[in-house]
């Protein structure tokens, strides 16, 4: 784990992302970066299972947790976010999907909107739903792949 954390610390330092989006096993890594003070920006945690447990220790950051209702770990994710220190900075989005979130986040292009809204919330701006639908398309050009369970 220490080697993986160091790779992520280096990647965050070099790339300086606006937001970290993590899925599945990557959620635990992203939360560790946040709780250790390495990352202080917005987080989007997708289908994180037990990796969401430490989200209660995240302070001062805008966090969006996406919980797929048909994921066997949905209950664990919801329990984890109930104890978050700053509930005003947290948005929990429950979607009718399975663990991979391909239907709700990818095919429906909802991930782009979640990213934009989380960034804006982190900057203190509340986005009306109608306005967020018109968010610019350049989000993908600013993304970088940092970690996946397939990288192990």
Image (tube, rainbow, N blue to C red):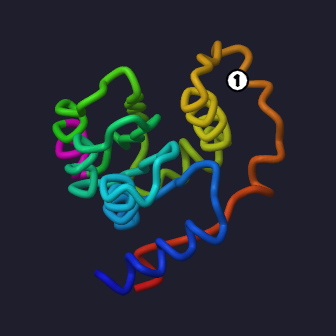
Count up the numbered dots.
1
Q: Label 1: few (<14), some or many (≥20) within 10 Å? A: some
| In this view, 125 is above or below 96 | above
Magenta span of residues: 72-78
Residue at 52% x, 54% y: name it. Answer: 21
Q: Residue at x 47, y 73 (%)?
A: 8
Up/down of 48 relative to 122, above or below: below
Q: Position of residue 103 (x, y in %)?
A: 55, 47
Q: Residue 107: x, y in percent?
A: 65, 47
Front-most of residues 6 and 48: 6
Residue for point 58% across, 49% down = 19
Q: Quadrant of residue 56?
A: top left
x and y percent of residue 41 in the render?
Answer: 51, 45
100 or 128, which lies in front? 128
Please tell me whether residue 117 belongs to the stretch shown in magenta. no
Among the 4 quarters of the image, the one containing residue 50: bottom left
In the rendered image of this protein, does residue 97 appear above or below residue 142?
above
Horizontal side of 146 relative to 109 (left or right) equals: left
For residue 104, above or below residue 28:
above
* Quadrant into which the N terminus falls: bottom left
Residue annotated with mark 1: 132
């Amino acid at each position: 784990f220490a080697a993986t954390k160091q790779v992520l610390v280096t990647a965050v330092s070099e790339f300086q992302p606006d937001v970290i989006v993590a899925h599945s096993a990557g959620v635990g890594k992203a939360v560790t970066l946040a709780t250790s003070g390495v990352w202080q920006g917005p987080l989007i945690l997708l289908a994180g299972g037990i990796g969401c447990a430490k989200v209660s220790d995240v302070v001062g950051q805008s966090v969006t947790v996406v919980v797929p209702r048909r994921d066997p770990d949905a209950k664990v994710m919801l329990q984890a976010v109930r104890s978050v220190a700053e509930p005003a900075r947290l948005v929990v989005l429950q979607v009718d999907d399975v663990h991979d979130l391909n239907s709700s986040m990818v095919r429906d292009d909802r991930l782009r909107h979640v990213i934009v809204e989380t960034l804006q919330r982190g900057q203190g701006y509340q986005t009306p739903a109608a306005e967020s639908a018109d968010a610019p398309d350049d989000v993908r050009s600013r993304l970088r792949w940092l970690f996946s369970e397939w990288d192990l």
